[in-house]
Amino acid sequence: MQIAYYPGCTIKASARQHEGAALAVLRALGVELREMEEWNCCGVVHSLTSDNLIRHMAPVRVFARLREQGNNEVATLCDMCFNTLARANQLAHEHPEQIEAMSVTSGGELNYDGNSGVLHLLQILRDRVGWAKIRARVRRPLRGLTVYPYYGCKLLRPSEIGIDDPETPAVLRDLMQALGATVVEGSLQTQCCGAYHVVDREELVAGRVAATTAQARERGSEAIVLSCPLCHFNFDTLQPQASAPLPVFYYTQLMGLAFGLEPGELGLDAHHTDLLPLLEQHNLIRPKGGPA
Amino acid sequence: MTITMRAGSGPDELLHKVEVLSEQHLANCYQCGTCAATCPLAAQMDLLPDMLIRHLLFGLPGVLERRTLWVCVGCESCTDRCPRGIDVARIIEALRQIRLQDRGDELAVAQLPDAARELPPIALVASLRRHTG
Ligand code: SF4
Ligand code: SF4
C-alpha cells in the first residue's frame, strides 16, 4: 500500500521521533508513505470567520500541489495539519466559489475542487491495515504496561471531520489493546491541553497538563500515549515538578516496541521525560549496559 | 415606558458585525451554560462564553476588552456540545478579529522569549495567527 504523505513543519522539527517511528512501523506493516515532492506549511489553524479567505490559501495550495503530483489522497501524522487540511478540503468541496475568489487574487493558479481524501495515520491503521493485522505483527506484547490515551482536540472536533466519536473516542484504546497494553481512561482525555498558549500563556497549559496527568495517575496509568506533536510538547515539558513526570509516548513508538523494532529507530531518547526506566521495568527494552 | 438596553448605536453594530463574521444568530442561545461548563479554560476567563453572548445581545459595553477573547484557544468543545447548534468558537473568533482590526496585533513577534525557538512550529504559527490581523 502506497499513500502520498504530507509531513508538515513540526514533524520535521520537534516531532522527528514520531515520523521515524511511524515510517518504521509502517514498513513492518507493508505501508509506504511517499512524501510529497513539494509542500508548504498548512497554516495550522482553520480560520473561523466568513471574510478571511486569504487564510485558507495555504492548505488549498497543498491540495493543488497534491493534484499536480498526480495524487488524490494524502496522509498526515500531525493532528493540527490533519484538522486544517480536512477542513480546507471540506470548504473547497462545499464552497467552490470561495476557492474561485481566492484563485483570482492569486493569479488563477489555485484550482481545487475539494475532492481529495485526507487521512490521519490513525485512520490508516484502523481502517486500512486493521487491528487484526496489527495484533498479528506484535512480537513483544506490552503486557503489564498501563497507559492513558490522550486525544486532545484536533483529531475529534469538529465532528464533521473528526476521526472518531468526539465524546467517547476508541481508536487509541483499541490500538493499545491490540499491542497488549492495559488502558485506563477518563473525562480529560478529550479536553484541550491549552495548545499554542505555550508560547505566551504557559501557566494555562501547565494547569491543563497537571489536571490531566493527575487523572491519569489516579486511574493507575504509568504513561500517557498521544498523537499530536503540540500536545506532546506540552505534556513532555510542562508537567508539575512536584512528582516524577509521567512518560509521554507517541503511539507509533509503542507500536515499534511491541513490534520488536530496534529502539534506536523509535527516538526514545528525544524526550524531556525519561522513557527508558519504565520500559526497562516492563522488560520492553534491555537495560543500558545490561546483558545483550 | 420604554427601557432602552443599548447605549447609542455602537453595541448594535458590534452584534451585527459578530453575526455576519461568525455566521451565527446569537438570539438562538437559550443561556443553558453548557459552553461555559465544558470549556477547559473557563477558570481563566473574565467573562464566560454564555455571558459573552448575553452581553453582546444586551449591548453591554466592554466585550472587546475582555481577556476571554485571548484565553479561548478555539478547541471547539463548546461548539460541539451546544444544544442549540451555536458555534461559540466562531463567535469568539469574530470578536478577536474585530478587536485586531481596531487595535492591531496582540502579540509582537519581537516580544517572544528566546526559548520560543525551541517550540514546535505549529505552536508559533497558531499563536501568531490567533493574535494578529
Ligand atoms: S451552550 Fe449554546 S445555548 Fe447554551 S449557553 Fe452556550 S451558546 Fe447558549
Ligand atoms: S473554543 Fe474557546 S470558549 Fe469554547 S471551549 Fe474551547 S477554549 Fe472554551
Image (tube, coloured by chain):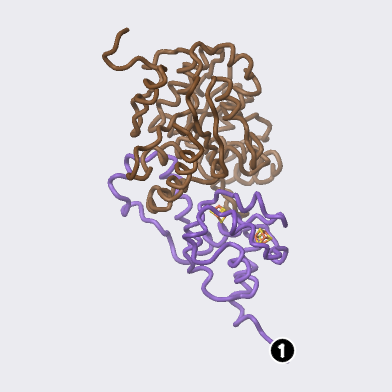
Chain colours: A brown, B purple
Question: Can the viewer see residue A282?
Answer: yes
Instruction: Tell me: residue A46, above or below residue A86.
Output: below
Dot 1 beta carbon under 8 Å from ligand 1: no
Q: Is residue B24 left or right of residue A26?
A: right
> Can you identify the residue that label 1 sits on?
B2
List x then y, in percent, for residue A42: 51, 38
Q: Is residue A13 left or right of residue A72?
A: left
Please report the residue visible at 36 percent of the width from the left and 45 percent of the height from the top: A240
Please report the residue visible at 49 percent of the width from the left and 31 percent of the height from the top: A225
Determine which quarter of the picture holds residue B20.
bottom right
Location of the N terminus of chain A by quadrant is: top right
List x then y, in percent, for residue A209: 44, 45
Name the element at disc 1: loop
List x then y, in percent, for residue B37: 59, 57
Q: Is residue A92 left or right of residue A4?
A: right
Determine which quarter of the picture holds residue B87.
bottom right
Looking at the image, the residue that sits furthest to the bottom is: B1
Taking the image in four quarters, ligand 2 sits in the one at: bottom right
- Letter of the chain that mark 1 sits on in the rendering: B
Determine which quarter of the picture holds residue A229.
top left
Please report the residue visible at 50 percent of the width from the left and 19 percent of the height from the top: A143
Question: Can the viewer see residue A56?
Answer: no
Instruction: Tell me: residue B29, above or below residue A134.
Output: below
